[in-house]
Amino acid sequence: RKEVEQDPGPFNVPEGATVAFNCTYSNSASQSFFWYRQDCRKEPKLLMSVYSSGNEDGRFTAQLNRASQYISLLIRDSKLSDSATYLCVVNLSGGYQKVTFGTGTKLQVIP
Amino acid sequence: GAVVSQHPSWVICKSGTSVKIECRSLDFQATTMFWYRQFPKQSLMLMATSNEGSKATYEQGVEKDKFLINHASLTLSTLTVTSAHPEDSSFYICSAPGQGFKSDYGYTFGSGTRLTVV
């Protein structure tokens, strides 16, 4: 089993739709979780951290389910500019330790 | 916010030559730098972790004699691909733990280097 697993997609959704991605992780000791966005041929950029209580940033909502070992990202009212690959990132121990990246989920928002 | 400057952005080199990639932290001190490689349609794979003033830690399967990492100062880490071959063609990217970056332990990435070996 991969340490961090994501459905590669692509998810093709119309503008205005709501879309959700899940990411599962294998190590129950993992402590920090992030969603990054990567545009084609660019570096990843932090979208949001994922907190135990769940957190929201505008149209984006992140959730953590420790019991089932997955995190999720919900995007409401999709925009064309949301088209990108969304990377799930897990840090085993917290702090400035190395992280493990999922393969990413590709989202294409269609006009 | 924290910025990591990576150069060059892209490079084309002949097989057998060496290529040096630099990553500089512009407004903070990066005691640690992670080096990743990403092949098309694949995830970022950690190659090695460099620490200022000490030897780098390489991930399993990464040849330390081929991928030389130097972290001589708190603001500069370099990766040298020695005797590059076409199979080394990839997107190389560095990342430093964000210093004072939202206090959420995010990581700041360089803009990446696309290496093509012909």
Image (cartoon, coloured by chain):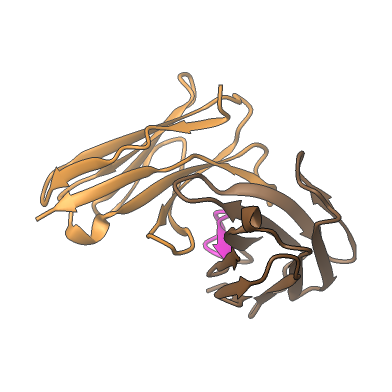
**Residue occupying the point 19% across, 43% down:** A12
Q: Nearer the viewer, residue B43 or A66?
A: B43
Q: Is residue A52 in sight in this rendering?
A: yes
| Above or below, comparing residue A108 to residue B110 in the picture | above
Q: Image quadrant of residue A80?
A: bottom left
Chain A, hue in figure: orange
Q: How many marks?
A: 0
B60 in the magenta segment: no
Tell me: B17 left or right of A38.
right
**Residue occupying the point 65% across, 36% down:** A92
Dominant secondary-structure state across the stretch colored magenta: loop
| Above or below, comparing residue A18 to residue B47 in the picture | above
Q: Position of residue A104 (x, y in %)?
A: 42, 43
Tell me: A71 left or right of B48.
left
Chain given the colour brown: B
Residue at the far bottom: name it: B26
Q: Position of residue B21 (x, y in %)?
A: 69, 72
Tell me: A62 left or right of B83.
left
Q: Is residue B4 in sight in this rendering?
A: no
**Residue occupying the point 48% across, 19% down:** A67
Q: Which residues are magenta?
A: B101-109
Q: Position of residue B18 (x, y in %)?
A: 76, 70
**Residue occupying the point 72% across, 62% down:** B84
Q: State the quadrant of the C terminus of chain B.
A: bottom right
Q: Nearer the viewer, residue B66 or A46?
A: B66
Q: Nearer the viewer, residue B37 or A70?
A: B37
Q: Position of residue B88 (x, y in %)?
A: 65, 56
Q: Image quadrant of residue A100?
A: top right
